[in-house]
Amino acid sequence: TMDFIRKALAHGEPGGNSAGAPNEAEPEKSSSEATAATLLVLQADAYDWAAIFRGRRLNDGRSIRVVQTGWDKIRVSANSPRMSPSFPIVVDVLPASDAVGGGCTIKPDFLLVRNEVRGALGTQDYRNSLFGMMFADLPSVNSLSSIYNFLERPIVQAELNKIERRLGSERFPLVPQAYFSSHSAMMYGDKFPCVLKVGHAHAGAGKMRVRDHRDWEDVRSVVLMTEGKYCTAEPFVEGDHDLRIQKIGDHYRAYRRRSVSGTWKTNTGCSVVEEIPLAPAYKMWADEASGMFGGLDVCTVDAICEAETGREYILEVNGTSSGLLPDHSDEDNTHIRDIVLNKMNSVLCAELEQER
């Protein structure tokens, strides 16, 4: 019965709009399909992870089968240990809308997540697949518990608030922020203009600049129509440029970004990006952020430099889906690959020894 259901799902109507069919690495001829370790990569927008892992093996000699797709192309079923001690999770990978065939059913041994679990639209919500992976305790980069916590802005902000309390605002200069559970709680007491962020959305979505208390009242009526979404507000900082500090394992980068599109949302539109030296403060910010939620293998810290004063303020931290600068993406992806390999060796090779 379960096989029938899985086959039906694998050949059902695919949802979403990921480009291309599932991307699988060719299994090495010297290793059988049964002995290869399966790595599921959730990234539909860029990079060929089968090529990035090509020729790599685990310490026990097993080859690595890479299956790459997007969140919208998977269906997850999971069992508790008593029901299925050997294979706690089964993932049906659906073919792309324009593909003939190409779907498959896999039992992943490890997971690499490089895309957000949900987008701004209700149709881009794949949390149920994440819950199934957590149910099966599937090892991953970043950890599934951290990815779960990054689903909501206030949870991430709460961790940043803890760091600021411990280090002080001079060492960890976090932009002050107010939280409102709904439109009826929106009594903002800080200075205007301010930036209002509605709900969980990222990449500039659900964000607006509010000029004064009169506009604030108008905005409250708009939030009323969002069916109970929470929102946050923070003082607007007129920026000279943005900063991004990237940490992948023990590798760091720092960037300066200047918008050329004229929009106040400096993380959207066209911009000029340049790599800059890693200041000690930037490294400390990234180190502190990477300790959130039990540890983040991949993270970035976004900050802004105030035009008038030159002061730098931390805006937010991004987790497993942090984007890479194209000029350095090849090198940075190898760092991510090496983190995944080390963790796969630690988890899977130890499991194999126990079974023997």
Image (cartoon, rainbow, N blue to C red):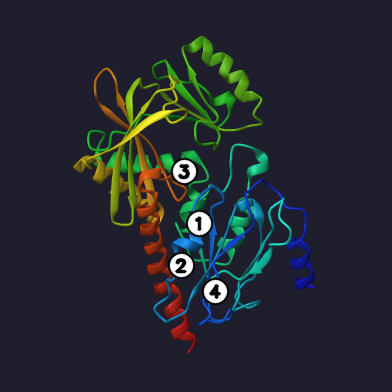
Q: Position of residue 175 (x, y in %)?
A: 35, 30
Q: CA distance from mark 3 to mark 2?
A: 37 Å
Q: CA distance from mark 4 to mark 3?
A: 41 Å
Label for residue 155? 3
Q: Is residue 98 left or right of residue 119?
A: right
> Earlier along the polypeptide chain: callout 3 or callout 2?
2
Q: Determine the residue positioned at 43% across, 31% down.
A: 267
Of the two numbered discs 3 and 1 in the rendering, the one whose residue sits closer to the viewer: 1
Q: Is residue 47 left or right of residue 172?
A: right
Of the two numbered discs 3 and 2 in the rendering, the one whose residue sits closer to the viewer: 2
Mark 1 crowdedness (10 Å alpha carbons): few <14, some 14-19, many ≥20:
some
Label for residue 134? none
Q: CA distance from mark 4 to mark 2?
A: 9 Å
Residue designated by label 4: 27
Q: Determine the residue positioned at 59% across, 64% down.
A: 135
Q: CA distance from mark 2 to mark 1?
A: 10 Å
Residue designated by label 1: 48
Q: Residue furthest bottom?
A: 356
Under mark 1, the amino acid is Asp
Q: Position of residue 126 (x, y in %)?
A: 62, 50
Residue 92 vs 27, above or below: the answer is above
Under mark 3, the amino acid is Ile
> Earlier along the polypeptide chain: callout 2 or callout 1?
1
Under mark 4, the amino acid is Pro
Q: Quadrant of residue 120?
A: top right
Under mark 2, the amino acid is Arg
Residue 319 vs 243, above or below: the answer is below
Which one is in front, 171 or 202? 202
Mark 3 crowdedness (10 Å alpha carbons): few <14, some 14-19, many ≥20:
some
